[in-house]
Image (cartoon, rainbow, N blue to C red):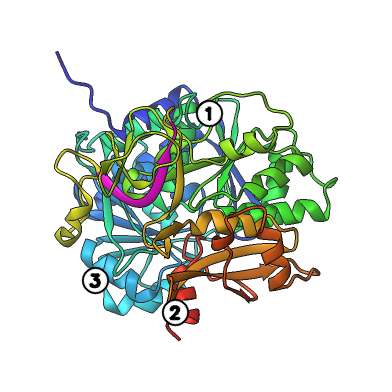
Amino acid sequence: MMDFPLTLDVILRRAETIHGDRPVVSRLEDKSLHRYTYAQMAQRAKQLATGLQSLGVNPGDPVATLCWNHYRHLEAYFGVPLSGAVLHTLNLRLHSDDLAHIVNEVQDKVLIVDKSLLDIWHQFESQVNVSHVVVVSDDNIVPEGTLGYEDLLSMGQPTTEGLPELKENQAASMCYTSGTVGKPKGVVYSHRALTLHTLGAGLTNAFELREEDCILPAVAMFHVNCWGFPYLAAMIGAKLFLTGPHLDAESLLDAFHSEKVTVAAGVPTIWHAVLNKLDENPQRYELSALRKLFVGGAATPKSLMQEFQQRHNLRLVPAWGMTETTPIGTISNTRAEPFGSPDEEDFTRRVRQGSPVPFVEIRARGTEGIIPWDGKTMGELEVRGPWIAKAYYKRPDASDRFTKDGWFRTGDIVSIESNGSMKIEDREKDLIKSGGEWISSLDLENAIMSHPAVAEAAVIAVPHSKWSERPLAAVVVVAGKTVTAEELRDFLQPLVAKWWIPDSFKFIDEIPKTSVGKFAKAALRKRFVES
């Protein structure tokens, strides 16, 4: 009996044949729209694969991208692995020194870069050795010494003839972590892992996607496989809208309205901005097509979920994952319930990170071993499954995160309900231990952000002579409103334990963010603790 390998070309063939007439739409640099079909995308992906061969790219060679979300980047998602090479997406928001370190560690052979991002490339170009630089340009005018992307495609053929036979356990792509301690760490994904992730994440008890959907990932394609949405959309045949560099709230809402988007995904900071824009002019946009707004990358404030639903009848659905989990691990919609006007208890339940998607297992370990699933006991989350990483790329020093029996230690502190619904209580490094008791910085942040005058709040631990640590809250006030520290203390009295209330509130203009939109608490500690 012949084995049928689980490789990405299976998804590409399905997109080309079964869903060939379904649309892919990209917003370009000048905000104009490019439209074509999955069949056309598949043809160009094969041209890219064979074009890379003509540049001397061999199976296993890494090919880097430094690109926004657009249709050519989508072609690279399929074309690079189809050639047998490894797609390596570079996070354009990392420091140039980190980018140089990553490219040198991986030894990328080719770089595909957007013309508008050449300034970033030039910042670390002299520190690396890349054989070919391919420039993506709408006018196909590229700098001397580089190759135009369309010219590269013209060197290839829209066929798989001559391409290597793919093996399901060979590397297909890789990403690097962001916001980590020390240098970013690489994670390599096999064809099997990506294919199974696509299957599992698209099921009813996961993202619940349909062919008639229009999916808009407000998630960077350079960050952890864009949460898997490019592969998911192609497998299911859903219309895919790619935002280009335009991730501002007005551009997103315009796309939701004009393209009849049904499913979108982004980090909380994205949805905060969208909510504010909606509040400014709630009648401007027709959003009745929107089924779900997935939110991940950081804990979802309950107040954000409530405000979206109560003021605009839009549903936020939390999800959890990491670079090491490819990334989807849990989603908070695996228990169906009526959608109407849920009470406080319903919101408390729905704001959890949810149950593991099919094929993923979870558990949590406390000081005395594996914790019970009682919804109260806290421990460090561990996960395993067919798309969970088993090691970091060239980082044996970080091997303690991976157990011999396949579990990955996430560093997230969680509690788990009896039905498997998981809630992130905090990151291990962000928990505040005051007088021997734990304070969840995430729960405290969510309580502060439920005040109508607070736009954002981040809580960190500061040393204390008596209690070891006490919470400090950095607060951004909504434009045009005012609030004092004393008013916030009074507001928090009925919401959290009295000893949780921060000793200090610092009012700042903006909370620093990581390259993927999470609160950069290390920067806050440097500002308020180490200064």
For disc 3, the marked residue is: 129
Asked if disc 1 and disc 3 are in contact, CB closer than 8 Å, the reply is: no
User: What residue lies at 25% left-to-right and 61% top-to-bottom?
Assistant: 108
Q: Would you say the residues marked 2 and 1 are in contact, meaning their CB atoms lie under 8 Å apart? A: no
Q: Which residue is mark 1?
A: 209
Counting residues from the N terminus, which is met first, the one under dot 2 or under dot 3?
3
Residue extending furthest toward the top? 1
Q: Please give left or right for residue 153 compared with residue 280 in the image.
A: left
User: Which of 119 and 380 lies nearest the eye of the viewer?
Assistant: 380
Report the span colored magenta.
408-417
Q: Amino acid at mark 2?
A: Lys
> Can residue 312 be seen in this snapshot?
yes
Numbered mark located on residue 372 in the image? none
The C terminus lies in which quarter of the figure? bottom left
Judged left or right of residue 48, residue 24 is right
| Near-viewer residue (134 or 240) | 240
Dot 1 amino acid type: Leu
Magenta stretch secondary structure, dominant: strand
- Residue 494, image x and y in percent? 67, 53
Res. 280 image quadrant: bottom right
Residue sitting at 81 percent across and 69 percent down?
480
- The Cα atoms of the two marked residues, 2 and 1, are separated by 42 Å
In the picture of the structure, the residue carrying the numbered disc 2 is 526
